[in-house]
Image (cartoon, rainbow, N blue to C red):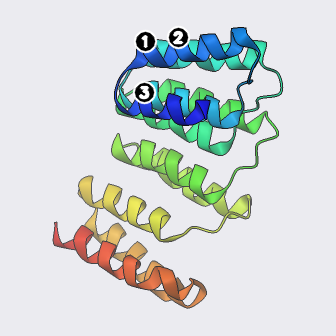
Amino acid sequence: MYNTIFNGYGKANLFELMASSLTDMIKSGIAFPDVFTLNSVIGSYGSCGKLKKMEKWFEEFQMKHEGVKPTTFTYCSLVSAYSRAGLLEKVDSIMRQVENSDVVLDTPFFNCIISAYGQTGDIERMLALFLEMKVRKCKPDYITFCTTIQAYNSQGLPEVANDLKTKMITSCGTLGTHTIQPLFFLVHIIFAS
C-alpha cells in the first residue's frame, strides 16, 4: 500500500508528501521500506532532476535499512538521472559500485549504461561497454542494437551504424519472434531520421 502511495506522489511531483509519508511509515514501524520503496523514491526524484534528494534517500536506505539492497533497476534509475544531467563521472561511479556489489550485470543494465554514453557522444566508452557485454555473457538485445545504432548515426558515423544494423539483422534468428517486429520497426525509425 505505501509503495503505491509513494509512487503516486512521485509521479505527481508531490515530493514533500512522498518524503513525509515515507518518514511517517518508517517512524510508525507499521511497515518497513523494501526495494520497491527504494526504487519508487529514487526513480521519482531522479526523473525530475532532484539529484541531491535522490542521493540523500539512496544513502539513507543504504545506511539505515540494511535489508534493502539496490537492484539493477535501482542503479538504472541513478544512471538515467545522472546521464540526463550530463554527469558522466557519476555514471562511472555507479558502474564501479555495481561491479563491487553482488548485483548481477544484465542486459537491461548494460542497455542503460550504453544509452548514457551514447547520448552524450562518448562512442569509445559505449563501444567498450558493448564489447564487455560479451565478456560478461550478456547477450545484446534489440534495445542494445538500436541504442548503439542511433548513437553512431547521431555522431555522423552512418557506415558503422549500417554495419551494426547488418549484424543485428543477421542475429535475428537467435532473437525471439516477439522481438523481430519491434526490431525492424525501430531500425526503420532510426534510419528514416
Q: Within 10 angstroms of label 2, few (less than 14), some, or many (20 or more) residues?
A: few
Does residue 128 appear in the picture of this structure? yes
Who's the residue at 44% across and 15% down the image? Answer: 17
Q: Within 10 angstroms of label 3, few (less than 14), some, or many (20 or more) residues?
A: many
Q: Residue furthest left?
A: 193
How far apart are labels 3 and 2 at the CA level?
A: 11 Å
Question: Which residue type carries mark 1?
Answer: Glu
Who's the residue at 34% across and 55% down the image? Answer: 151
Front residue of this view, candidates 128 and 5:
5
How far apart are labels 3 and 1 at the CA level?
A: 9 Å
Q: Position of residue 41 (x, y in %)?
A: 54, 26
Residue 143 relative to residue 36: left or right: left
> Which comes before the other along the chain, label 3 or label 1?
3
| Residue 9 numbered mark, or none | 3
Residue 80 relative to residue 174: left or right: left
Who's the residue at 35% across and 81% down the image? Answer: 184
Q: Mark 2 near mark 1, Cβ–Cβ under 8 Å?
A: yes
Residue 85 relative to residue 141: left or right: left
| Residue 16 numbered mark, or none | 1
Front residue of this view, candidates 130 and 21:
21
- Tell me the element at label 2: helix
Quadrant including the C terminus: bottom left
> Which comes before the other along the chain, label 3 or label 2?
3
| Residue 20 numbered mark, or none | 2
Question: Which residue type carries mark 3?
Answer: Tyr
Who's the residue at 78% across and 33% down the image? Answer: 100
| Residue 129 numbered mark, or none | none
